[in-house]
Every structure is written in C-alpha cells, then in structure tokens.
Amino acid sequence: MDQPSVDRKAIHEDMERARAAFHELLDATDADLRRPTDGTRWTNGQLLFHMLFGYALMRPLLILMRIFGRLPRGASRAFARVLDAGTRPFDVVNYLGPLGGAKVLGRRGMGSVFDRVIAGLHRRLDAEQEAHFSLRMHYPTRWDPFFRDVMTIADLYRYPTEHFEFHRGQLTLPAGPQGAH
C-alpha cells in the first residue's frame, strides 16, 4: 500500500490562493454580498461563510480520520452509513448555519476566521507524519459531492479547496480583480 509522497507545497499553495481569493471576494460591496447566488438558496455573503466552513470542518474531520483510520475498515463504513442516514438533518443544519454565521461574523470576522483556520491547517500539514497520509476511512458520500467512499488524510487536505472552488463558481459577484467568475 505504498503511496507517493504528498506534495505538501502544492497543498499549502492551494490554501494560500484560496485565502487570497477569499479576501478579494470579501471586498465586494454590501449590496453584492446580499445578492442571491447561482444554484443555491444563499446570498453571496452566506455562501462565503459556507466556503469558510468547509475549511473550518477540517479539524474535526482530521480527528475522525485519526480515530477511524486506525480501526478496522468496517467501523468507518458503519459510521459513514449512519451519517448518510442522517443526511436530511445535516442538510438543514448545513443550510441554516451560513444564514446566521455570515451575520454574526460579518465580513471582517469571516476574513479573520479564515486566516486563523488556514494558518492552523498550514501548521497541521507541516507537522503531519508521512505515514498518516495513508490513513483512510469511509465517508458519507451523500453529505458532500467531494466526499468519496474512501478517503485518506491526503484527500482531506485537498477537500476544502475543491469545495471552495466549486462554490466560488456559484457566487454572483461582479467580475473584477478577484475573478469571481
């Protein structure tokens, strides 16, 4: 089960590009942040919070991976099935969270939290033992289109940027230096 070494530098660069893009997107006007998105029920500001939350979820996802990645594969398969069975409540929470989160944090708060989350992920990635990158577990594939049936820690580090870029395409912010479209 030898895997090639994970390109930490590429993951760091992807996270930094997302961080810079996030701040550019936050520079939108208040009116633009209140506009509806393309393909979601959120406003641009609420979707930005959801994009931030994709990175914030990494800490608990990594903890779960470290636990289930060491257990027999059937344990994570059963856990993923339970989570998939709870997709409806998850979808409700996933929808409602950004409604309040964007208001509570505001643009400055979201930028500050995004910076802290990315800085924490950089530190975790740098400290990650090479052997841990091959830990794997089953994931609830009904929760997110970027969750695959079986994922490794290396996959998890790539997940939030995939999630970010997908939702970035749903923003309806005017094209400008940030390249929202």
Image (cartoon, helix red, strand yellow):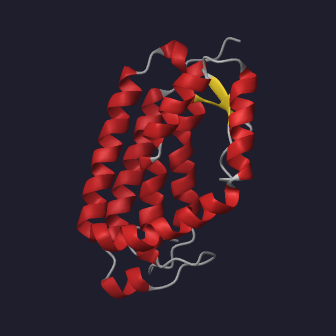
Establish if 34 lies above or below 125. below
Residue 83's spot in the image, x, y percent?
67, 46
Res. 72 visible in picture: yes
54 relative to 41 in the view: left or right: left
Comparing 2 with 136, the one in front is 136
Establish if 97 lies above or below 120. below
Establish if 98 lies above or below 132. below
Res. 177 visible in picture: no
Residue 153's spot in the image, x, y percent?
56, 28
Could you tell me how many numbered marks the image carries?
0
Residue 114's spot in the image, x, y percent?
33, 53
Residue 49 falls in image quadrant: bottom left
At 72% across and 49% down in the image, what residue appears? Answer: 84
At 49% across and 52% down in the image, what residue appears? Answer: 54
At 33% across and 74% down in the image, what residue appears? Answer: 103
The quadrant of the rendering that contains the N terminus is top right
Comparing 21 with 75, the one in front is 75
Residue 107's spot in the image, x, y percent?
28, 70
At 43% across and 66% down in the image, what residue appears? Answer: 48
